[in-house]
Image: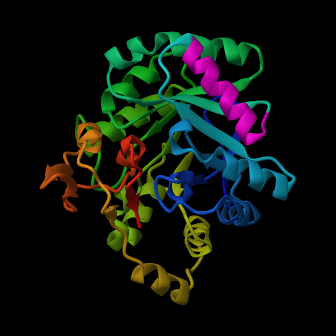
């Protein structure tokens, strides 16, 4: 496994970052023990970096993995909090539930525009204070937009950026792939630590995995790449790819046979909350229940977090 210094921070991270949304209640909904075992297996394979968020509801998985591993894991988490007190609550929750006194990277979650950043200024001020107190090591933003990457590149207080990037530009909200590449290059040159997300387009590029990984690993301005993993097979295959090794054809075949989709359970009441919060217009209400358009859905799983009946899953 290769490791790189994350921008100007004191953190050295594995090129492969464990994307933990996939094991969480929003997606595979693994048991805490099963999820922790997959994280632990990745750690044993050389992965020392994990991406999570308060929204994912999976801190307990990380806590359990850390207790079993008896060694550290670099954690990057995020919160939608926009007030000073709200972000304070988010940081304290992360510290308590992960079992880590100091959170390595804490981010403003899914920032969209400069106006969004301005609206979260109080939360950012708390993170600055938390860093000064030694509760957080580095401050960052996650985003699907070129505008935020460019804006964060010019902000001294932002040290880490977590942007969406893949070879087809899927999920970029406000520009082309070239626009995003140029923004990331700018941020990298200004000393920001950068780790990418959605290299496989939320699962939509699984059938083009070789091209997707070739692109993301050859793009020189990423210190790490978060890849969602929910099984030992996925960890093993991704580690081999990131280490430049041949993949096991048996493992590869098992993974290729696994089809994923967004499932809306029968008990959906058609409240429309998922439709309201889907940023890709992949959901609509028909005959009193939510229906997914698989061509538009990027399998991010965020809609599940807004379902009051918890009837949406990726399987």
Residue 77 quadrant: top right
109 left or right, relative to 36: left
Q: Looking at the picture, how far across and down is residue 204, in whole percent?
A: 31, 63
Residue at 49% x, 16% y: name it.
155
Relative to 94, say whether 60 is above or below. Answer: below
Residue 215 seen in render: yes
Nearer-the-camera pick, 66 or 44: 66
Is residue 8 one of those drawn in magenta?
A: no
Give the overall secondary structure of the magenta segment.
helix
Q: In which quarter of the image is the N terminus?
A: bottom right
247 left or right, relative to 303: right
Residue at 41% x, 67% y: name it.
315
Residue 156 seen in render: no
Residue lying at the far bottom of the rendered structure: 250
The magenta span reads 85-100
Is residue 92 one of those drawn in magenta?
A: yes
Residue lying at the far left of the rendered structure: 287
Relative to 150, say whether 243 is above or below. Answer: below
Residue at 83% x, 52% y: name it.
67
37 left or right, relative to 234: right
State the scheme by which the image is colored: rainbow
């Amino acid at each position: 496994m290769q490791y790189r210094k994350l921008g100007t921070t004191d953190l050295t991270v594995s090129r492969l970052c464990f994307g933990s949304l996939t094991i969480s209640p929003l997606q595979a909904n693994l048991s805490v023990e099963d999820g922790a075992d997959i994280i632990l297996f990745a750690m044993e394979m050389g992965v020392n970096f994990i991406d999570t968020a308060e929204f994912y509801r999976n801190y307990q998985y990380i806590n359990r993995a850390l207790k079993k591993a008896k060694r550290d894991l670099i954690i990057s988490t995020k919160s939608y909090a926009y007030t000073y007190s709200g972000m304070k609550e988010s940081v304290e929750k992360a510290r308590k539930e992960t079992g880590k006194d100091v959170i390595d990277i804490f981010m403003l979650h899914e920032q969209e525009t400069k106006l969004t950043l301005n609206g979260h200024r109080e939360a950012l001020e708390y993170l600055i204070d938390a860093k000064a107190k030694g509760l957080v090591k580095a401050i960052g933003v996650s985003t699907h937009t070129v505008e935020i990457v460019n804006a964060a590149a010019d902000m001294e207080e932002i040290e880490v950026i977590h942007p969406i990037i893949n070879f087809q530009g899927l999920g970029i909200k406000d520009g082309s792939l070239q626009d995003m590449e140029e923004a990331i290059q700018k941020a990298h040159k200004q000393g920001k630590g950068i780790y990418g997300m959605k290299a496989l387009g939320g699962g939509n590029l699984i059938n083009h995995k070789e091209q997707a990984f070739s692109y993301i690993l050859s793009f020189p301005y990423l210190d790490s790449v978060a890849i969602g993993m929910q099984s030992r097979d996925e960890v093993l295959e991704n580690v081999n790819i990131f280490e430049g090794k041949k993949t096991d054809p048996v493992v590869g075949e098992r993974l290729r046979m696994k089809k994923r989709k967004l499932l809306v359970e029968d008990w959906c009441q058609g409240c429309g909350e998922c439709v309201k919060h889907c940023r890709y217009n992949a959901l609509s209400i028909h005959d009193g229940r939510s229906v997914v358009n698989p061509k538009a859905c990027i399998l991010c799983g965020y809609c599940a977090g807004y379902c009051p009946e918890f009837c949406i899953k990726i399987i």
